[in-house]
Amino acid sequence: MSKVKKILGNWVLLNLFIAIVLVALIFIGVNVGLKVFTEHNKTVEVPDMVGCSYHEAEALGQESELQLIVADSVYVNRFKAGAVYSQNPKAGSKVKKGRKIYLTMNSSHKRQVSMPSLVGLSVRQAKVELTARKLILGRLIYKEDIATNNVMAQMIGKRPVAEGEKLDVGTIVDLVVGLNYEDPYTQVPSFIEQAYHKAVNSVQDSYLNVDRLIFDETVKSYSDSLAAFVYRQYPEASDNKVMMGRGVSLYLTLDREKLPKPAPVDSLTLDL
């Protein structure tokens, strides 16, 4: 008690003590106030809006108390017109109420490009030209010629397509290409574990055609298909030669358990 009385009797120490108490109270008050103001630890899960119309996405946003902002638009031929193509933050993210969700919408208007002249180019050069114009390489149709993989004609379905013709972005263009029968062979590499688009590109880069794409039950949406990977192929990878233009079937999934298990390594016995 004597020490307390001594401190209280000393106005300098008393003022210092009061100042410390006030600072502590202010700190506690500000901290509590900020938590209340920012709704500390109160978050919502961002709903999946990909594939929804804007009005559907808006309803989901209002339900979760989120703000939607259309930041960009694209045109993807095989995606639903006028639907949300992508979102940021992604579905499942934990955010605070009132957070802005930026949407990229798939345009309902098809953009058109001019068909380039691919005749005389190699398959690889032609593919680069098509990709640059957002056109899609379809089948390689081989025809006897002195120059293997030299483009002889460009087709949409069964009709030729002329240079300069206006095409919708995403149009599939087939190529008639040469095949010298002195060396008409290629090999089937492994496409296992490659994502959808990469696998298709790898098939074409091997001078083969995609016959079928078979998605399993785990693939339920367009975005799922983009993330899916090959777990099986026919024919299987082999060093044996096959004719260029051979068809390949790709089986795709999101389930990594379906990937083939590595062959067991035989143990080696060393004679010492």
Image (tube, grey):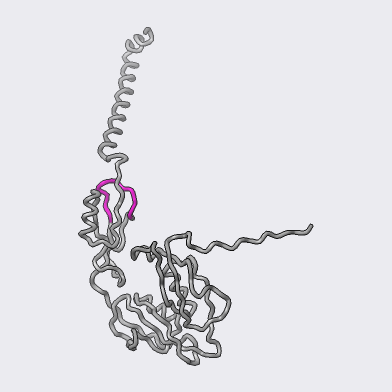
Residue 239 percent location from the top left of the image: 58, 76
Q: Is residue 251 left or right of residue 51?
A: right
Q: Is residue 272 left or right of residue 55?
A: right
Q: Check if residue 92 falls in the magenta segment.
A: yes
Q: Residue at x 24, y 53 (%)?
A: 61
Q: Residue lying farthest right?
A: 272
User: Depth check: 202 or 18 in front?
Assistant: 202
Q: Is residue 66 left or right of residue 187?
A: left
Rendered view: 228 above or below 146: above
Give the image quarter of residue 15.
Answer: top left
Q: Residue at x 20, y 59 (%)?
A: 55
Q: Is residue 211 left or right of residue 37?
A: right
Q: Residue at x 45, y 72 (%)?
A: 250
Give the image quarter of residue 23.
Answer: top left
**How many labels sit on residues?**
0
Rendered view: 131 above or below 23: below
User: Magenta region: which residues?
Assistant: 91-101
